[in-house]
């Protein structure tokens, strides 16, 4: 059974090669692992038994090339499994391959990969979003059962929204980052990209948990699906205002669904939307610069500055500059202060509601190949980065389409109230 299902996926992956969702699939290896799994009596009762999972190419899976879609690491073979991968395997899952992404997860469109851009399976002339472009495309094109992505400022939620699939970024600390190549370690979280919200709940419960090798992790009780009919659902005026009219229309209809489910809708106001992008990118540049110092050509692959793409180089150069003593007070320290202010304001508005619902991205995905300025590219992230800046949790579920282009509804909640986001995602998906 598992072998047949793997075979079907492999054929489909071959047929839909031009989507460029995967950058590494090892047919012989997967088929052999599928055979072994079928014989493994001990794993038969596990919750993920036989599930076929695609993994973003920045998460270590032993024996695969963890290139982060960069030439820098094109020859780096993972010597070990990341904690999340160990958990997947221990629960009966099978890894089918490594998915395409923006180089080192720096991007919002899936176009900066050294292996070429990914296409959006739901709207093939459009970008799929990023940076977990391949994972979202693999789920949307039915090239796996489910996938893992990583989210530093929206990289799970943005492509989930553009590709019409489900994505979830857990609260910071819920899932171990051990074995994930850092983009900005105070923001990064691994999370599921799936065909439905129930699968996102299932996968989150498997990968979460305290990990002795990641000191930022905490233990949380199992996330259970709960009744949301008594939820207070917040709608943030400023989040709605930055979205295109066509997206806003869809989201407004989505909000009505929560009303129909019995939820009380509460209007909220968040003062610091303007701070989101500068705060996020300043911190991102500094942390990314620091994370890339190990790619100096001695231990791993090439010296990053010599082979990377334009966006990665931009971040390294600016990150270096603003980390220097004479500038750090002016930029980095101020960004940390802004982060605190943003967090406090987010906790204030979340105090009186169970979840906040709204748009995921302010605009529809652009056409593949269309040239955007860095600022235009960053603008995609305005509604997703506050989640990471504030350490809260957020998920995305499909909420209709505009001329065939999917639109995702974003649901956010307080730190460690992941259960509420997941429950609201499940209820919404059923009711839509
Ligand atoms: N688009 C954002 C960035 O480029 C977010 C990326 C991510 O979440 N990995 O940094």
Image (spheres, grey):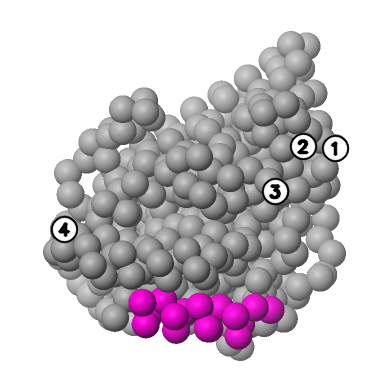
Separation of residues labelled 2 and 3 (CA atoms)? 9 Å
**Where residue 289 sits: x, y (%)?**
69, 29
> In the shown orientation, is residue 142 left or right of residue 366?
left
Q: Identify the element where label 3 is drawn.
A: loop
Q: Identify the element where label 4 is drawn.
A: helix
The numbered mark, 2 or 4, whose residue comes first in the sequence reads 4
**Compared to 274, does 45 lie above or below?**
below
- Please identify, in this view, whether the residue under mark 4 or under mark 1 is nearer the observer: 4
- The crowd level at tag 2 (other Cα within 10 Å; few <14, some 14-19, many 20+) is some
The numbered mark, 3 or 1, whose residue comes first in the sequence reads 3
Separation of residues labelled 4 and 3 (CA atoms)? 36 Å
Q: Which mark is residue 177?
A: none
Q: Which mark is residue 42?
A: 4
View extreme (bottom): residue: 403
Q: Quadrant of the C terminus?
A: bottom left
User: Which of the two residues, 108 or 103, is positioned nearer the viewer here?
Assistant: 103
**Where residue 260 sits: x, y (%)?**
25, 78
**Compared to 87, does 357 lie above or below?**
below
The numbered mark, 4 or 3, whose residue comes first in the sequence reads 4
Separation of residues labelled 3 and 1 (CA atoms)? 14 Å
- Please identify, in this view, whether the residue under mark 3 or under mark 1 is nearer the observer: 3
Name the residue beneath numbered marker 2.
302
């Amino acid at each position: 059974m598992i072998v047949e299902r793997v075979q079907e996926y492999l054929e489909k992956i071959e047929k839909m090669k031009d989507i460029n969702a995967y950058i590494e699939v090892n047919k012989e290896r997967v088929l052999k692992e599928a055979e072994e799994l079928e014989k493994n009596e001990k794993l038969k009762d596990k919750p993920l038994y036989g599930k076929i999972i695609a993994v973003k190419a920045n998460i270590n899976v032993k024996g695969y090339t963890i290139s982060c879609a960069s030439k820098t690491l094109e020859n780096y073979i993972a010597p070990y499994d990341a904690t999340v991968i160990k958990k997947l395997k221990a629960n009966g899952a099978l890894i089918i391959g490594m998915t395409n992404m923006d180089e080192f997860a720096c991007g919002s469109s899936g176009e900066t990969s050294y292996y070429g851009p990914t296409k959006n399976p739901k709207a093939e002339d459009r970008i799929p979003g990023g940076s977990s472009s391949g994972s979202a495309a693999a789920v949307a094109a039915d090239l796996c059962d489910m996938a893992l992505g990583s989210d530093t400022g929206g990289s799970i939620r943005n492509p989930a929204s553009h590709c019409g699939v489900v994505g979830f970024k857990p609260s910071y600390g819920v899932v171990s980052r051990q074995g994930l190549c850092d983009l900005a370690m105070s923001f990064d979280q691994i999370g599921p990209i799936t065909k439905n919200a129930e699968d996102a709940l299932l996968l989150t419960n498997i990968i979460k948990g305290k990990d002795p090798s990641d000191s930022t992790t905490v233990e949380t009780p199992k996330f259970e699906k709960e009744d949301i009919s008594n939820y207070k659902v917040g709608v943030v005026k400023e989040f709605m205002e930055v979205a295109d009219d066509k997206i806003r229309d869809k989201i407004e209809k989505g909000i009505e669904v929560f009303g129909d489910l019995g939820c009380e809708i509460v209007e909220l106001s968040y003062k610091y939307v303007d701070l989101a992008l500068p705060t996020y990118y300043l911190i991102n540049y500094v942390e990314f610069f620091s994370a890339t110092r190990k790619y100096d050509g001695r231990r791993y692959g090439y010296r990053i500055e010599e082979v990377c793409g334009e966006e990665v180089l931009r971040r390294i150069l600016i990150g270096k500059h603003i980390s220097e003593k004479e500038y750090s007070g002016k930029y980095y320290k101020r960004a940390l202060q802004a982060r605190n202010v943003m967090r406090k304001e987010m906790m204030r508005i979340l105090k009186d509601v169970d979840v906040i619902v709204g748009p995921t991205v302010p605009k529809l995905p652009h056409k593949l190949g269309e040239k955007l300025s860095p600022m235009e590219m960053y603008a995609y992230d305005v509604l997703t980065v506050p989640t990471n800046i504030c350490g809260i949790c957020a998920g995305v579920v499909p909420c209709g389409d505009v001329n065939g282009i999917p639109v995702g509804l974003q649901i956010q909640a307080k730190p460690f109230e992941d259960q509420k986001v997941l429950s609201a995602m499940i209820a919404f998906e059923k009711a839509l």
